[in-house]
Image (cartoon, grey):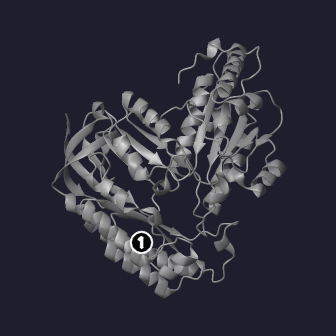
């Protein structure tokens, strides 16, 4: 949706309907920016910091889109910005401490820029004890809002710019999904696309359902319209995002399955690659496996978090599948797509985990042979059922199991990933290499990175690259010829 903000009549009352209401307040923010420029001889500067998952990263693109449309310019150094916003994560307890540390640093830095506005949003803001602490110890924060009303950022920004006190607007839940809010993509050639929000699973260790709310699926026509627009604008790869994409569509007035949605997305011209995350094993259907096996555009990578190889621990986690069921799923997906790359998440040291349970996890890792495993030591999360379970594992035992698991994972992954050595693979070139400007970095369909010599003009294009050497979780390559 394209709106001429300069033609919005600010002498009238704000519209009640969305997203027109947000464009009205965006126009008000632009008027404030003009006054700022007249006063200081420059546009205001903004800085957005994102903690946590890819859904948070996508939300931050919306925040940046609002700020850019209002007239702010991006400032890499948060200490030099006039408006700083932290989009927070609260999955692990230490994420909260990281934020408080950053706020402490900014508080000292505000002496050089006392008019700096600081905003906080995201999952952490949904916790009552966090709000209480912010009001008591961080009163210099200007704006606080949560996960359910991020679409209101233009309205909240407008109110914040004229206020001299902390504004708090945190909702417990919502059933509203507002389309066509401005967004500022980080990449021109790939983009995340939210297909649903919230979670209904209530895993016993996880805070997400309490801070993101219940599942709400976007209408398929809105998703398809967004992706068609992205493809027309040069995007060749989309990442479909949701806490559990496999349960997409169940809350719609006219339900459709995730597999059906993928089939519709595959038909969009110009789109070359489709990724998605995260998939809950209990909802991985035969229909989805079949679509993945026959698709020409769905990437050959499936992230399927198992969390534990012990059926007993999985039951305590409220995961609602068994070790045997999970192994059956991996066998099915490999029969349908033999070249599939499987990755997973594993939590070590969940309350009540015994050495026998841990051995079950090692056994599962050896049988599945993942390309990569994201390993975590259990983090006690206040507000979750697991936090008060008996049998909390000691840090020493947890660390020992974590180290043993990591060694097993790395040994297997290096073998699994090296099978492509010498082959020529299609790579989406993403950037100049962070460590060597003579190299480019790209990503294969199976999600492995490839570093190879090439010209930056290749960025954003699909190229064929010969894989010379596997270095564990990435390859060194050569070639880099653009695919026609």
Q: Is residue 432 visible?
A: no
Q: Which residue is depicted at the point 53% across and 51% down?
A: 53
Q: Nearer the viewer, residue 251 or 48?
A: 251
Residue in view at x 60 percent, y 40 percent: 177
**Quarter where residue 367 is shown:** bottom left
- Observer able to see residue 290: yes
- Residue tagged by mark 1? 406
Quadrant showing the C terminus: top left
Q: Residue 72, percent across and down?
A: 61, 25
Q: Nearer the viewer, residue 305 or 144?
A: 305
Mark 1 element type:
helix
Q: Position of residue 415 (x, y in %)?
A: 26, 68
Is residue 38 shown above or below 48? above
> Residue 61: percent from the left, percent from the top?
54, 37
User: Which picture quadrant has residue 214?
Assistant: bottom right
- Tell me if 144 is positioned left or right of 443 in this view: right
Asked if residue 61 lies left or right of residue 279, the reply is right
Quadrant for residue 142, please give it.
top right
Which one is nearer the viewer's eye here, 15 or 155?
15
**10 Å crowding of disc 1: few (<14), some (14-19), many (20+):** some
């Amino acid at each position: 949706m394209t709106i001429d903000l300069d033609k919005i009549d600010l002498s009238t009352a704000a519209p009640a309907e969305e997203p027109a209401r947000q464009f009205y307040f965006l126009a008000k923010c632009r008027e404030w920016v003009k006054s700022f420029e007249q006063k200081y001889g420059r546009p205001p500067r903004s800085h957005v910091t994102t903690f946590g998952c890819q859904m948070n990263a996508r939300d931050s693109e919306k925040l940046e889109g609002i700020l850019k449309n209002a007239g702010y310019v991006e400032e890499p150094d948060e200490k030099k910005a006039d408006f700083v916003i932290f989009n927070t994560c609260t999955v692990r307890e230490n994420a909260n401490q990281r934020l408080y540390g950053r706020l402490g640093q900014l508080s000292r830095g505000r002496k050089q820029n006392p008019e700096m506005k600081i905003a906080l949003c995201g999952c952490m803001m949904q916790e009552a004890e966090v709000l209480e602490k912010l009001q008591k110890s961080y009163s210099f924060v200007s704006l606080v809002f949560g996960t359910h009303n991020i679409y209101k950022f233009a309205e909240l920004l407008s109110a914040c710019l004229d206020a001299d006190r902390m504004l708090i607007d945190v909702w417990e839940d919502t059933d509203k999904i507002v389309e066509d809010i401005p967004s500022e993509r980080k990449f021109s050639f790939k983009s995340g696309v939210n297909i649903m929000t919230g979670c209904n699973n209530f895993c016993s260790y996880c805070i997400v359902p309490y801070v993101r709310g219940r599942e709400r699926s976007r209408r398929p026509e809105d998703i398809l319209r967004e992706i068609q627009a992205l493809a027309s604008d040069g995007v060749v790869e989309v990442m479909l995002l949701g806490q559990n994409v496999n349960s997409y569509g169940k809350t719609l007035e006219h339900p459709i399955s995730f597999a059906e949605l993928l089939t519709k997305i595959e038909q969009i011209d110009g789109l070359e690659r489709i990724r998605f995350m995260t998939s809950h094993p209990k909802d991985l259907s035969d229909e989805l496996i079949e679509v993945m096996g026959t698709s020409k555009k769905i990437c050959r990578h499936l992230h399927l978090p198992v969390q534990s190889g012990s059926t007993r621990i999985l039951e305590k986690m409220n995961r609602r599948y068994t070790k045997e069921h999970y192994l059956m799923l991996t066998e099915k997906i490999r029969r349908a797509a033999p070249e599939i790359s499987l990755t997973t998440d594993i939590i070590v040291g969940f309350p009540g985990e015994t050495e026998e349970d841990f051995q079950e996890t090692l056994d599962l890792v050896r049988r599945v042979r993942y390309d990569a495993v994201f390993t975590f030591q259990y983090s006690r999360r206040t507000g979750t059922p697991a936090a008060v379970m008996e049998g909390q594992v000691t840090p020493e035992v947890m660390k020992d199991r974590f180290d043993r698991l990591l060694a097993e994972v790395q040994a297997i992954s290096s073998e699994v990933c090296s099978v492509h050595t010498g082959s020529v693979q299609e790579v989406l070139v993403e950037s100049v290499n962070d460590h060597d400007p003579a190299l480019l970095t790209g990503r294969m369909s199976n999600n492995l990175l490839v570093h190879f010599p090439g010209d930056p003009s290749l960025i954003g294009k699909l190229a064929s690259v010969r894989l010379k050497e596997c270095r564990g979780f990435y390859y060194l390559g050569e070639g880099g010829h653009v695919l026609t």
